[in-house]
Image (cartoon, helix red, strand yellow):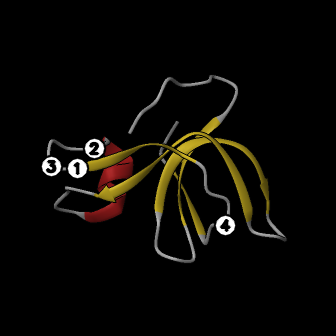
Amino acid sequence: MAPKKNSTLKHVIVTTERRGVFYGALKSYNEKARVAILENAAMAIYWGTTNGLLELAATGPTSKSKISNKACHRQITTEADHGE
């Protein structure tokens, strides 16, 4: 889930209105429209953690996690800073 990091962009986990969970570099965010543009985004298909999404954010994927190839998605419902 951790693609090459661009030191100028903040890496975030976002959730969509349709329950999708994505990780990527936050290129831009329009709070009023609730639209985020992510670079090098990947979808968490299965978290594979024992303590949920925040564990995935804190420690990254486990051997049981299923993470997609790069994806593009824009509508989000929440943002969790993963500590960078």
Circle 3 is placed at which residue position? 64
User: Image point 61% across, 24% down: which residue?
Assistant: 6
Please, what is the three-letter code of the amino acid marked with disc 1? Ser
Horizontally, residue 82 falls left or right of residue 75, namely: left
- Assess disc 4: are there few (<14), some (14-19) or many (≥20) residues with their C-alpha within 10 Å of its C-alpha: some
Horizontally, residue 32 falls left or right of residue 22, namely: right
- Assess disc 2: are there few (<14), some (14-19) or many (≥20) residues with their C-alpha within 10 Å of its C-alpha: many
Classify mark 1: helix, strand or loop.
Answer: loop
User: Image point 70% across, 26% down: which residue?
Assistant: 8
User: Picture coordinates of residue 54 (x, y %)?
Assistant: 36, 59
The part of the image, by quadrant, that contains residue 24 is top right
Can you say whether 15 is above or below 67 in the image?
Answer: below
Circle 1 is placed at which residue position? 65
Mark 2 to mark 3 CA distance (whole Å): 8 Å
Mark 1 to mark 3 CA distance (whole Å): 4 Å
The part of the image, by quadrant, that contains residue 32 is bottom right
Circle 4 is placed at which residue position? 75
Is the Cβ of the residue at disc 3 closer than 8 Å to that at disc 4?
Answer: no
Mark 4 to mark 2 CA distance (whole Å): 23 Å
Please, what is the three-letter code of the amino acid marked with disc 4? Gln
Q: Earlier in the sequence, mark 3 or mark 4?
A: 3
User: Image point 20% across, 56% down: which residue?
Assistant: 49
